[in-house]
Image (tube, rainbow, N blue to C red):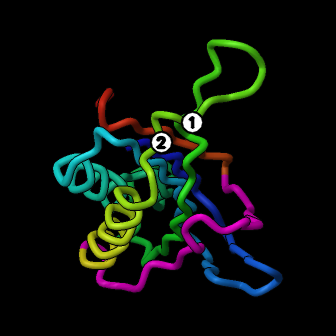
Amino acid sequence: MRAVIQRVTEASCKVDGTITGEITNGFLVLLGIEDADTQEDLEWLAQKIANMRVFGDENGLMNKSLADIDGNILLISQFTLFAATKKGNRPGFTRAARPDKAIPLYEEMKKQLSSLLCKEIQCGIFGADMKISLLNDGPVTIMIDTKNKE
């Protein structure tokens, strides 16, 4: 799994002009799922996202997590995080999981994050043409790949 985590003061997702998810203060998480991903990858990544300390404390240092600030998550499926760009100018997406594998893992990620944070996770619609708006705070943007745990 790959995730791009953006600290935001606000973010929203629209599908066909209708808001499907909207948050203030928290993370916009773009989540890519590949065929090789497992439940172990999902659980590790959910813990990382829920516990990541990138919000300012009273001294302005990044020491607080989502739970510390009562933050929110807008979770967006993003198969293009597995774009292969080595050859030519048109990316290939063969590493991205097909919907029959990706949808259950995406839904499980929503459940895991909701359980860890004790709140509803806002989201887009898997596979839809989504319009994402955000106000990146910082900017703070973190990329995580479960196959390269750095």
State which quadrant residue 148 falls in. Answer: top left
Residue at disc 1, secondary structure: loop
Marks 1 & 2, CB-CB < 8 Å contact = yes
Q: Nearer the viewer, residue 127 or 120?
A: 127
Q: Within the magenta stretch, is there residue 130?
A: yes
Residue at the left extreme? 40
The image position of residue 55, as x and y in percent, is: 48, 57
Residue 80: image quadrant is top right
Quarter of the rendering occupied by the C terminus: top left
Residue 107 percent location from the top left of the image:
36, 71
Looking at the picture, does residue 117 appear above or below residue 129? below
Q: Amino acid at mark 2?
A: Ala
Disc 2 secondary structure class: loop
Q: Quadrant of residue 42?
A: bottom left
Residue sitting farthest toward the top: 87
The residue sitting at the right extreme is 17
Q: Which residues are magenta?
A: 116-137
Quick check: 62 left or right of 44? right
Q: CA distance from mark 1 to mark 2?
A: 6 Å
Q: Nearer the viewer, residue 78 or 132?
A: 78
Identified at 77% across, 67% down, the residue is 131
Q: In the rendering, which numbered label is found on residue 93?
A: 1
Residue 15, given in percent of the width and then of the height, sits at: 73, 77
- Kind of residue at disc 1: Phe
Image location (x, y in percent) of residue 87: 66, 12
Q: Pointer 2: what residue?
A: 96
Task: Identify the residue at horizontal 52%, vertical 79% (top origin).
Answer: 122
